[in-house]
Amino acid sequence: MNALSINVQGFGDLNKRRWVSELCNKHKVNFLALQETKMLHVDLWMLRQVWGNTHFDFASMSSRGMSGGIICLWNNLVFKRTKIICNENYVVIEGMWIPNNVNIMWIMVYAPQTLPLKIVVWDALTNLISNWNGIVVAMGDFNEVREACERFGSSFNVRQADLFNSFISNASLKKLQNLKCAIRVWIAAYRSDSQKLKREHLLRLSSIDIKIDQGTANESDFSNRRDSIHILEELDKPPVFICNKLESLRNQFFIGSDLGEKKMTWVSWKKCLASKKSGGLGIGSIFGLNVGLLFKWIWRFLQNAPDLWIKVIKSFYGHHGGIFDVPTQRSSLSPWCGLGILEHCNIQHRQYNNNL
């Protein structure tokens, strides 16, 4: 049984959904709980995108404005729901875990801020748990700590902690104490292994470079050098979701939307033409930018003679394609004259003939 709970702090971003999907696939998650989705409506296509297939069921609670929102997804081949209870601050799902034939109650919590509302939530959940005959799995954002050492960046409230501890005790819940310790150990071991591996391959590269300088390196040395460089690049590579976020920011700047969105995209010329001080690219003239793009077609015309479109232009406007024609009337304009860009460039007819 693999369950994953995340406070996503908004689930509208495509890259964040991809990141969650990668976590589910990597850890073979059977049950996913998302808090603070900030979504009023749930899109089935979006859920399928996150889960990766159609073998899922879900329960959700809409957000209130830009706060709250819960989405629960699970593999319907291993868990069969029998009842769903939705509240503004929690979602409860009762059902059977098929592989072990046991009853399970899943509780997803996004706790309120104020103490009176927390007391109401704790009492309601305690009542539900006391009347349930089976396993209980509670997860989510409880917005509370049990000890002062767990509170960072804000003051520790003794009364709220006591009430939270009472709720855990009365509901006979057990906190997974070893989970955070296991994560810390894993991070420390991963960091230690990465540093050790990096030192080994840097030393290996250094010794191979000495052989190359001395002229004694063989084919095996070059192969080992390529392998070491590849491993070092992988060690220094940022996580996929960070790369996706950077790509999303770049796309938002240039075309005003994410490439994964199903909408037509346009180049954001205002940002391209704005000065660098104003956050733009500092391109002074949209005409100057377009000239560079349009001249690619003239270059293709000169270089790719066998192409069909070039043959069509030459059949209408002659061997030169009408590039240097001087228009006398509107009907005689060649496609190049219609673009109106050649008159601004220092291309001589003689040079063109020589190129041909």
Image: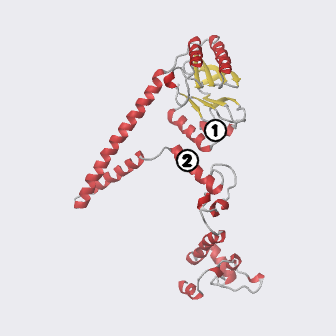
User: Residue at 61% across / 76% down in the picture?
Assistant: 298
Counting from the top left corner in percent of width and height, residue 59 is at 67, 28
Q: In terms of depth relative to the viewer, which is nearer, 238 or 76? A: 238
For the view shown, which residue lies furthest in the front direction?
155
Counting from the top left corner in percent of width and height, residue 1 is at 53, 25
Q: In terms of depth relative to the viewer, which is nearer, 269 or 292? A: 269
Secondary structure of the residue carrying numbered label 1: loop
- The reply to whether discs 2 and 1 touch (Cβ–Cβ < 8 Å) is no
Q: Is residue 337 left or right of residue 51?
A: right
Type of the residue with mark 1: Phe
User: Residue at 65% across / 41% down in the picture?
Assistant: 12
Q: Which mark is residue 58?
A: none
User: Residue at 66% across / 68% down in the picture?
Assistant: 286
For the view shown, which residue lies furthest in the right direction?
330
Q: Which mark is residue 11?
A: 1
Going from N to C along the chain, the mark reached first, 2 or 1, is 1
Q: Which mark is residue 244?
A: 2
Type of the residue with mark 2: Asn
